[in-house]
Amino acid sequence: MVKYEEHFGINIISTQTNTYTDVDFLTEDIVNGVEKFHTSIEGYKKTPLVKLDNLSSKLGVKNIFVKDESYRYGLNAFKGLGGLYAIFRIVCDKLNLDHTSTTFEDLQKQDIKEKLKDMVFVTATNGNHGKGVAWAANKLGCSSIVFMPKGSVVARAKAIENMGNSTVTITDLNYDDAVRKASSLADEKGWYLVQDTAWDGYEDIPNFISQGYTIMAKEALDELEKLGIEKPTHLFLQAGVGSMAGSVLGYMVNRFNKNPPITTIVEPATVACIYKSAKSDDSKPHAVTGDLQTIMAGLNCGEPNTATWPILRDYASFYAACPDYVTAKGMRILASPIADDTKVISGESGAVGLGLLSMLMEQDEFEDIRRDMGLNKDSVVLIFSTEGNTDPKGYDEIIYDGRNYSPFV
Ligand SMILES: Cc1ncc(COP(=O)(O)O)c(C=O)c1O
């Protein structure tokens, strides 16, 4: 392991393992099946892959592509991709339907809805996942119960309730304890737990969720291929529990024959559980506990997903722990495009990868990391802006009111 010197509050390590886990729940065949499901949903549309030419020139790389997930299903975040697919699989299982031939439309027929109407889905969420679950449950005429951690923004709770048929509670627990609460209530009441993280003994449903997420990676790679780019050279993937990063990277591991792009996992400095796990020398996932604070609410999770952790351990090369200003910087850059670059509305949990890339390319102090990452004028960087302004007031405070998260003053 290499630990680089801290600059501007950013800590980065690089590791190399000699284990190369098989990612058998994210194979191309499985992802093709998930794609067939999603593309059959009413309202499905590919999200834009934005090419930021002027920003690339300014930062000194060949290309920067940003997949703008604020357009996903009108939900302002990517998360519905996972919740919807998992609920589909749970329902197929309950009704003994073949998921490879059943469509989501089939499940919306009146006789099936009648069989489903008493199903209750429960989850814990920082916002986006709960919105996706409530949206999917409501589409099938089912209800949802959603628990949010202490300090959650009321606008995000309301956005979940607005999906319909959903009861939302902001608890006084942190995210990981809210997950435990949802899980024990599911056992007690016979509700269906749809949680976007795995632990020993609870893997099938989070793996369905991870499978659902792969669609954004497939869309991006298929579009890059059409532009003559077979594979991006660099990926920056933000992580909470690491399901999203694991699903994108895991899919690329299979698509590129265990030779994915050079990948950096990016987390809030205060809740960097993947960074902490990569830093430890026992190959195991490690939790960060306590009352954890960051503006990156979607990434405010202290316990790694045990099913996707081996993917991040074996196939990512760099792990970065970033203070909040890094994402605020990324949000501002995406909100103020240079010349004819396209504007991207990116929320707190969507922009930290771009914020980090800008710091790495602009600051002399990061010269050694740039060199070791191979970031240069030939680099083709792919980033997923996983949410829009899901907390509109917080977003405006950062972008328009200049709320200051800068380390430079
Ligand atoms: C917008 C956004 N981006 C990224 C993530 C991170 O996903 P994961 O917890 O799977 O690492 C989340 C999780 O809620 C999120 O809401």
Image: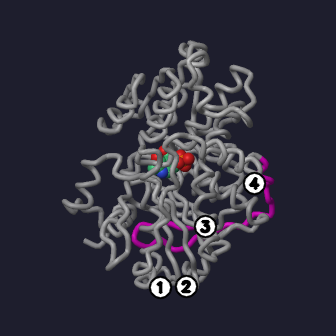
For residue 295, above or below residue 162: below
Where is residue 25 shown, x and y percent of the image?
A: 75, 46
* Residue 376 tag number: 2
Judge the density around disc 4: few (<14), some (14-19), many (≥20) Cα neighbours within 10 Å: some
Q: CA distance from mark 2 to mark 4?
A: 30 Å
Q: Check disc 4 and report its element: helix, strand or loop.
A: helix
Q: Which residue lies under the disc numbered 4?
A: 28
- Residue 11 falls within the magenta-colored stretch: yes
Q: CA distance from mark 1 to mark 3?
A: 20 Å
Judge the density around disc 1: few (<14), some (14-19), many (≥20) Cα neighbours within 10 Å: some
For residue 245, above or below residue 256: above
- Residue 244 lies left or right of residue 345; in this view the side is right
* Residue 318 tag number: 3
Mark nearer the N terminus (1 vs 3): 1
Q: Is residue 271 visible?
A: no
Where is residue 102 shown, x and y percent of the image?
A: 69, 32
Q: Which of label 1 and label 3 is nearer to you?
A: 1
Q: Is residue 256 visible?
A: yes
Which amino acid lies under the numbered mark 3 shown in the image of this protein? Phe
Q: By what rule are the colours in the image chosen?
A: one colour
Camera-side residue of 336 and 151: 336
Which amino acid lies under the numbered mark 2 shown in the image of this protein? Asn
Residue occupying image coordinates x 24% and y 48%:
393
Camera-side residue of 302 and 157: 157
Mark nearer the N terminus (2 vs 3): 3
- Residue 204 lies left or right of residue 196; in this view the side is right
Which amino acid lies under the numbered mark 1 shown in the image of this protein? Gly
Q: Which residue lies under the disc numbered 1?
A: 60
